[in-house]
Image (cartoon, rainbow, N blue to C red):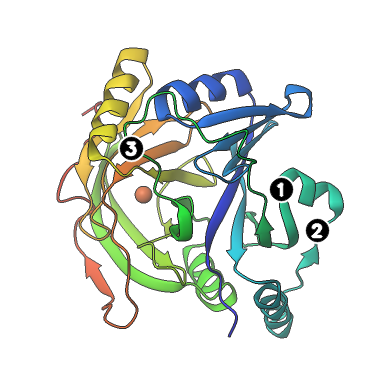
Amino acid sequence: MAAISTLGYVCVSASNLDAWESFAVDILGLHAERRDGGRTLALRMDEYEQRILIAEGVDDDMVAAGWKFDTADALETFVLQLGKRGIRAERCDAALLASRRVERAYTCVDPDGMQHEFFYGPAYAPASRPFRSKVLLGRFVTGELGIGHYVSAAKDYAATIAFHEDVLGLKISDHIRAPLETPMGTIPFDGTFFHTETGRHHSFATAQIPFPKRIHHVMIEVSDFNDVGLAHDRCIAAGVPIMMGLGHHPNDGMFSFYCVSPSGFAIEFGSGGLVVDDRTWEVRTYSQLSDWGHKSPAR
Ligand SMILES: [Fe+2]
């Protein structure tokens, strides 16, 4: 069976690209390039032409997930398999391929309205335009593990789980069912975490939580844990709101904090995430979201 290799990119529709550019470059340490006469912001994390594509728009939300296949054959086989499951994936036209900087892609939409783009052949930046971070000590953890993960606030939790497991073929890593303390009080949290072939603990998770956006957060990972603390310091100094302070998750082992992006959803900035080995992995259910920390500053 053809399987998704990893989460290769994400696309965001945002109303304030200037705010995103300074947030991405000065706070997160990403490398930004403006395109389309300034109406698109391509954010780089490594040698890829782009990893987070932010287009001027009104959604202020994530609008598409780019799932990578390692070969054209694997991509075509996967699309045929989708068809057998009753999911028609449209072949992307030249304009969309150019925008995504990929060789070939197909697209379909999930029950939450998220566009999924299945692609092969990402463009790499030339050596004359190397990735440069203004602030990182280390590097972003990408490569075969992809850009990180995103977490959806599902409208229909069961349908979202079924789509990602049965249609996309992602594997369940684990579940967390725990009381979640929020500024509005304690609510029950139920989350399911999914990994792809290359094993980042989760490239996608979905949770039954009240949140006004399609996604709750996008996570990006750094190699040096000091960069997590330094990014946290930069948020405080610049007045970027902290959604949840420094903490540690029991399931993926991530040391991280969550800050509020200019579009209102969060960016989780972390280090030390686990990689799943399917030969020995055991699916567990955890009873707490964090071993320590990740407190809302409003509490
Ligand atoms: Fe996360």
Crowding around mark 2 (Cα neighbors within 10 Å: few <14, some 14 to 19, many 20+) is some
> Compared with residue 288, is residue 34 higher up or lower down, i.e. above or below?
above
On screen, residue 8 versus residue 121, left or right, reads left
Question: Residue 244: horizontal and vertical position, in percent?
Answer: 28, 35
Image quadrant occupied by the C terminus: top left
Ranked by sequence position, the earlier of labels 3 and 1 is 1
Which tag is nearer the camera, tag 3 or tag 1?
3
**Residue under the image location 62 percent in, 54 percent down:** 114
Nearest to N terminus: mark 3 or mark 2:
2
Residue at horizontal 60%, vertical 69%? 70
Q: What residue type is labelled 1?
A: Arg
Element at label 2: loop
Q: What element carries label 1?
A: loop
First in sequence: mark 2 vs mark 1: 2
Q: Could one spot residue 93 in this view of the protein? A: yes
Name the residue furthest front: 127
- Reading the image, the residue beneath label 3 is 138
Q: Nearer the viewer, residue 32 or 288?
A: 32
**Residue farthest toward the right in the current orientation of the protein:** 94
Closer to us: mark 2 or mark 1? 1
- Report the disc number at residue 101: 1
At label 3, the amino acid type is Gly
Residue 60 location, quadrant: top right
Residue 2's x, y, as percent?
Answer: 60, 80
Mark 2–mark 1 Cα distance, whole angstroms, equals 12 Å
Q: In this view, does 223 lie to the left or right of 11?
A: left
Circle 2 is placed at which residue position? 92
Which residue is at the front of the view, 229 or 108? 229
Q: Which quadrant of the structure image shows residue 231?
A: top left
